[in-house]
Image: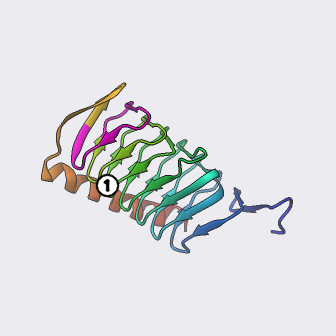
Amino acid sequence: MKPKNNLTTRKESAVMSSLNISSQAHIASQSVILGDVTIGADSSVFYYAVVRGDESSITIGKRSNIQDNSTVHVDYGFPTVIGDDVTVGHNCVIHGCTIGDASLIGMGSTILNGAKIGKHCLIGAGSLVTQNTVIPDGMLVIGSPAKVKRPLTEEEIQSIYKNAADYVALSAAQFE
């Protein structure tokens, strides 16, 4: 489709600006991706999700998934970095923060500017991680405001990897 005002439609998704999306990524129709955005191989952006790198950059690693109705955004001076094997559940707001590899952000959670989520973390559904909060590696975090509850077990960490792998397979089947 011919670009109009620096806006191109691809698979009914609005795509604009400085995009670096792997040819192996899976992008659902009706999602919106714009601005300075990089998405790694085997990652997916599901229906009605918005990934908007208009004020800073967004980087999504490999095998990560942004589920339906979630918003990934930035602020000036607050890029968003999402590692490899990360699951962002339905209806989340991920804003100007860093999420380490193999972490799971539960449905309806909000992560605010400057927050740093370590690798192998599980943020419980509906949690609010406030601005500049630092979560160490391997923790279960729940609540509003979010509090560290305990270390994750090895079995729980492995289930995060399995969840990410399941979404790689699901998105490959749905979006081909």
Please name the residue shown 45% across and 68% down the image: 42
* Residue numbers of the magenta segment: 123-140
Residue assigned mark 1? 163
Q: Quadrant of residue 86?
A: bottom left
User: Can you name the residue that lies furthest to the top here?
Assistant: 144
**Residue 51 falls left or right of residue 139:** right
Residue 113: x %, y % from top left: 49, 40
Q: Quadrant of the N terminus?
A: bottom right
Residue 116: x %, y % from top left: 37, 46
**Residue 45 falls left or right of residue 1:** left
Q: Is residue 127 above or below residue 73?
A: above
Q: Quadrant of the C terminus?
A: bottom right
Q: Quadrant of residue 134?
A: top left
Please name the residue shown 23% across and 53% down the image: 159
Q: Main secondary structure of the magenta part?
A: loop
Residue 136: x %, y % from top left: 25, 45
* Magenta region includes residue 49: no
The residue nearer to you, when weighing 130 against 34, is 130
Q: Mark 1: which amino acid?
A: Asn
Question: Dot 1 surroundings within 10 Å: few (below 14), some, or many (20 or more)?
Answer: some
Please name the residue shown 42% across and 60% down the image: 170
Q: Is residue 168 above or below residue 112?
A: below
User: Can you name the residue that lies furthest to the bottom here?
Assistant: 23
Q: Is residue 31 above or below residue 84?
A: above
